[in-house]
Image (cartoon, grey):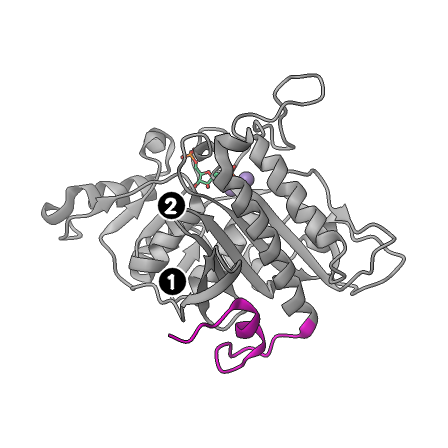
Amino acid sequence: MKRVTLTRFLIDEQYNRSAVPADLRLLIEVVSRAIKAISINVGKGALAGILGEHAAAAGDASVNVQGEAQKKLDVIANEILLEANEWGGHLAAMASEEMEGPHAIPHRYPKGEYLLLFDPLDGSSNIDVNVSVGTIFSVLKCPEGAEPNRQPTEKDFLQPGSKQLCAGFAVYGPSTLLVLTLGSGVHAFTLDRELGSFVLTHENIRIPEDTKEFAINMSNMRFWEPPVKRYVEEMLAGKTGPLGKDYNMRWIASMVADVFRILTRGGIFMYPRDNKDPSKPGRLRLMYEANPMAMIVEQAGGAATTGRERILDVQPTGLHQRVAVILGSKNEVDRVTGYHS
Ligand code: AHG
Ligand code: MN
Ligand code: MN
């Protein structure tokens, strides 16, 4: 079998139809190196003493900007990504789930024209129970390009997902996977742990248009809006209901693992809007969870909406804004989106 590494894939147009500019290619290489480092840390688990909550200086458990408890690995993964990308030379700034505002590139390092956004560790609640977690990232162009004397602000990041140049995610599971799109299809690479390189193992992934599998946190049922309640009730009715087929349910509570399953065999994933906390129109964050996943799912032939509109068309208003997410097999996403209108 011919081995196509990520490096070769990015250069060789035989595999990758979008001629990738050199600086974007090198940026992806840097991100993939950080992902390897995170994978090694995740894999050590309790041996490295890195499970559990992150303790703030005072010894209390620390919370991030969104009021969520930070795990030690959330903080470690964030630091690995920051450190690796600070001196890479391709970025104007970075933004992360774990930091309130944009992270500037230190003056002593060269800068580039891209903005990198990430969820350093997705599925943190699964770390301590040894279930798959991951990293999600998104690349945008900085509106004013690489201006040496201007630090990008939050406003520079607030571009709709349709402007993403690249999106990807890693899954730290039985094997470590890197899923990537540059706007012409979706490809996945498996980490060869001996050689330390990502090898192309899933070329041109396509999501089946129909499915019999759904993913939703059913414990929130009483908070859902009527269209989602109707759809889930119809799926639960199975063969005897209007959809005429029996469905299966899976909920890993790591979006990276749920989305990779959907890329592999189809399915629909929903974290819909609910009235649990009216100040939050959804649980997942637009800029570094919903947008990159929506780009990947669309590039694989699936669909991604908020129930009301295409996720990639949402005009962002804040770095950490939350959004309803319905994504996966096209015909099912279209059906439940239709129920909203
Ligand atoms: P994070 O760990 O980055 O905060 O994200 C977790 C997300 C997502 O991965 C998952 O689909 C969802 O939260 C799980 O939510 P529940 O705990 O409500 O099931
Ligand atoms: Mn997350
Ligand atoms: Mn996270």
Find residue 77 and report its image quarter. top right
* Residue 102 visible in image: yes
Residue extending farthest to the bottom is 14
Magenta stretch: residue 2 in it?
Answer: yes
- Residue under label 2: 270
Viewer-side residue, 245 vs 133: 133
Answer whether labels 1 and 2 touch (C-beta < 8 Å). Answer: no
Q: Residues within 10 Å of mark 1 (few under 14, many from 20)?
A: many
Is label 2 in a helix, a strand or a loop? strand
| 311 in relation to 234, above or below | below
Dominant SS type (magenta): loop
Boundaries of the magenta span: 1-22
- Residue under label 1: 302
Residue 180 is labelled as none
Find residue 30 and report its image quarter. bottom right
| 233 in relation to 293, above or below | above
The tag earlier along the polypeptide, 1 or 2, is: 2
Where in the figure is residue 232, as x and y percent of width and height? 26, 42
Apparent side of residue 230 relative to residue 299 in the rendered image (left or right): left
Q: Residues within 10 Å of mark 2 (few under 14, many from 20)?
A: many
Circle 1: residue type: Gly
